[in-house]
Image (cartoon, rainbow, N blue to C red):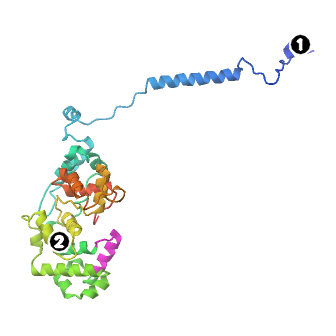
């Protein structure tokens, strides 16, 4: 016989059955193990919350003096990333047409002004492309630039390029052939239909050519450094079809004037709403060009004399491509 046969009978006896509805007061081994695991995990979690893990120390490139001044609230002490961006622009030659200025000085002013309100915007958006890939002052043709702005009024970028290409083709196929004399020598209706211009735009281009023919406008007049931005604005808006928006766009992108604030541009107003947290009198709190004029001017006043650059960053805040970009 096997060894199991000589063992006491009670070893093989089954445990007595409990009557239905009764619960054992002594937890089973499985329940006790589960309870222990829960208590152990809770204890571990409480220890981890009471003693947080050490975080890696970020690299700080600020000098001790700058760090101290920044802690004291000095407005002229910028983030090291912003300083690095400005340093990369310091070697660029001065930009602008009649008014020449350094882009690094303009970016620093925009980042520092109004308590460094736009410092993070400058860091996130990077170097401005407003003054990149521009022609030299000596090669600027003001009439051709104004014609292109008139053609692009109230059109998206792709549509404006298409109409402009047709306009160039209608006047000989080369942009250098677009002159006041060539426009006045052509038939208005034929030029309008071949280029796909509206009647208002065709009349505006012919009136612009007449202003150049009379001498009211010319390269010398528009590039005169003695004229203020307000005087140039008055001369441009005297042309039929060139309103505030067209004049401001030409002053910013054609003449590269540093202190132009295009309040009539929807993208700039939307950017101000996002960056400054302002609500206007328009629909859904949109800033209105006329009803919120004082609010808009007050928001951008600290960024003078470089409000053109601040407006470019407002386009970036609104995620709207700037004109001719």
Which residue is label 1 attached to?
9
Q: CA distance from mark 2 to mark 1?
A: 115 Å
Residue at 66%, 22% (x, y): give it.
33
Near-viewer residue (311 or 103): 311
Q: Residue at x 35, y 59 (%)?
A: 283
Residue indicated by mark 2: 237
Majority SS type along the magenta span: helix
- Judge by depth and name the residue closer to the eye, 301 or 170: 301
Nearer to us in this view, 18 or 75: 18
Which labelled disc corresponds to residue 46? none
Residue 234 seen from this side: yes
Locate residue 110, reporting x and y percent.
21, 50
Q: Is residue 295 magenta?
A: no
User: Where 8 falls versus 202 (above or below)?
Assistant: above
Q: Under tag 1, what secondary structure?
A: helix
The boundaries of the magenta stretch are: 152-168
Circle 2/circle 1 CB separation < 8 Å:
no
**Where is residue 64 shown, x and y percent of the image?**
21, 31
For the point 44% across and 23% down, the residue is 51
| Left or right: residue 91 compared with residue 312 | left
Residue 101, horizontal then vertical, whole percent: 14, 56
């Amino acid at each position: 016989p096997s060894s199991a046969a000589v063992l006491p009978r009670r070893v093989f006896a089954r445990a007595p059955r409990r009557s239905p509805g009764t619960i054992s007061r002594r937890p089973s081994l499985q329940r006790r193990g589960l309870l222990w695991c829960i208590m152990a995990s809770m204890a571990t979690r409480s220890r981890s919350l009471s003693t947080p893990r050490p975080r890696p120390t970020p690299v700080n490139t600020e000098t001790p003096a700058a760090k101290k001044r920044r802690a004291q609230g000095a407005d002229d002490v910028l983030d090291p990333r912003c300083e690095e961006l400005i340093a990369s622009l310091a070697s660029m030659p001065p930009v602008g047409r009649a008014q020449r200025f350094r882009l690094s000085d303009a970016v620093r002013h925009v980042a520092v002004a109004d308590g460094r309100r736009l410092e993070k915007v400058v860091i996130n958006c990077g170097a401005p492309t407003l003054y990149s890939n521009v022609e030299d002052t000596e090669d600027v043709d003001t009439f051709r630039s104004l014609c292109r702005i008139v053609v692009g009024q109230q059109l998206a970028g792709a549509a404006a390029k298409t109409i402009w290409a047709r306009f160039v083709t209608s006047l000989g196929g080369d942009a250098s052939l677009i002159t006041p004399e060539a426009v006045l020598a052509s038939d208005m209706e034929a030029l309008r239909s071949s280029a796909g211009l509206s009647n208002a735009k065709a009349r505006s281009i012919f009136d612009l050519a007449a202003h150049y023919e009379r001498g009211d406008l010319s390269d010398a007049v528009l590039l005169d450094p003695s004229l203020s931005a307000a005087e140039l604005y008055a001369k441009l808006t005297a042309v039929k079809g060139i309103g505030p928006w067209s004049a401001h766009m030409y002053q910013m992108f054609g003449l590269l004037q540093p202190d132009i604030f295009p309040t009539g541009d929807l993208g700039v107003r939307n950017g101000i709403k996002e960056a400054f947290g302002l609500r206007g009198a328009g629909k859904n709190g949109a800033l209105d060009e006329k009803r919120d004029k004082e609010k808009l001017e007050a928001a951008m006043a600290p960024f003078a004399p470089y409000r053109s650059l601040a407006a470019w960053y407002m386009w970036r805040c609104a995620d709207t491509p700037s004109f001719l970009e």
